[in-house]
């Protein structure tokens, strides 16, 4: 019953805020991913006009079923991306692009880290350029909260990233590039540093380590960040002593315990 009460209160809070905001157009880049699907469902339910990108024609029908206009495009094809963003005419872009194997399969992660870093650097460059050309007013972008250099915990947003680490360094440098591009662009830039994801579609039923984050709560943070908060970086993770998300809780009125109901998934 407590979970239901939290869910009802949180949904009511978001809808009350959005009810005073003129409903405009949102483009979700990476709409068919674990977070993207949930985020699109939330945004449509809140009354937004939503377009969503996917690389797969097979996933276009799934987006249509969610009430989303599917846009099939490769983020590395800069001219095509520019064309579809201009055509979509979004006021807000939510960047949820990643390229990782299911359950972060260890045997596939070495290659996946390279692909993912390329999306975060080059894909972000193309998306930011297209957003600027299309007159986008705000971008919300996914980063990570588990690339901090060793230091006092809980890590806050001003803690340095572990750029030279042999394991996490590649990812840390890639998200540093992503964050810099989003935060220096001529629109409002919000960077959400997500914790280690778990829940439906992630391959993990339980928290996979320090600073975890349920996929539903991740999507809810992006939904809230579409209309709240000043440009900057925000940690998005559960409070387990590893990462502090106080800034996001205060700014977005975000609840790490947020969960969608079964009918909403």
Image (cartoon, rainbow, N blue to C red):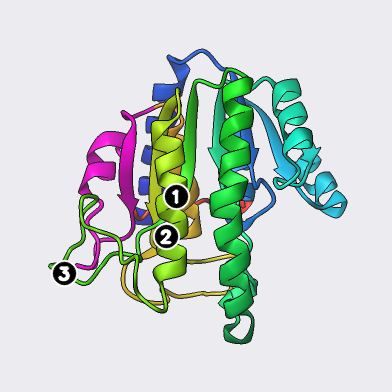
* Residue 229 painted magenta: yes
- Residue 88 in sight here: yes
Q: Earlier in the sequence, mark 1 or mark 3?
A: 3
Q: Secondary structure at mark 3?
A: loop
Name the one closer to the observer, 178 or 13.
178
Under circle 2, the secondary element is: helix
The residue that label 3 is drawn on is 151
Tag 3 and tag 2, C-beta contact below 8 Å: no
Q: Which residue is mark 2?
A: 173
Left or right of 262: which side holds 61? right
Q: Identify the residue at horizontal 29%, vertical 37% (top origin).
A: 253
**Of marks 3 and 2, the one in the foreground:** 2
In the image, which disc is placed on residue 177? 1
How far separated are the C-alphas under marks 3 and 2? 18 Å
Magenta segment:
228-254
Residue 45 position by quadrant: top right
Question: x, y (%) of residue 209?
Answer: 36, 76
- Which residue is located at x 56 percent, y 34 percent? 128
Mark 1 vs mark 3: give the one in front. Answer: 1
* Frontmost residue, 149 versus 235: 149
């Amino acid at each position: 019953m407590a979970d239901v009460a939290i869910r009802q209160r949180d949904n009511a809070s978001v809808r009350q805020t959005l009810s005073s905001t003129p409903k405009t157009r949102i483009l979700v880049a990476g709409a068919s991913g674990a977070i993207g699907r949930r985020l699109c469902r939330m945004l449509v339910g809140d009354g937004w006009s939503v377009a969503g990108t996917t690389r797969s024609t097979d996933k276009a029908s799934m987006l249509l079923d969610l009430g989303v206009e599917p846009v099939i495009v490769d983020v590395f094809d800069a001219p095509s991306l520019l064309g579809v963003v201009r055509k979509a005419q979004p006021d807000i872009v939510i960047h949820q692009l990643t390229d990782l194997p299911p359950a972060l399969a260890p045997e596939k992660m070495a290659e996946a880290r390279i692909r993912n870093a390329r999306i975060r650097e080059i894909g972000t460059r193309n998306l930011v350029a297209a957003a600027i050309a299309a007159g986008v007013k705000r971008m919300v972008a996914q980063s990570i909260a588990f690339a901090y250099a060793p230091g006092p915990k809980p890590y806050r947003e001003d803690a340095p990233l572990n750029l030279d680490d042999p394991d996490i360094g590649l990812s840390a440098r890639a998200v540093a590039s992503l964050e810099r591009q989003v935060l220096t662009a001529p629109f409002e830039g919000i960077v959400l540093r997500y914790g280690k994801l778990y829940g439906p579609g992630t391959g993990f039923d339980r928290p996979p380590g320090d600073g975890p984050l349920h996929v539903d709560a991740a999507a809810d943070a992006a939904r809230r960040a579409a209309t709240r908060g000043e440009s900057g970086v925000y940690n998005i993770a559960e409070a387990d002593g590893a990462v502090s998300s106080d800034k996001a809780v205060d700014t977005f009125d975000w609840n790490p315990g947020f969960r969608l109901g079964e009918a909403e998934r």
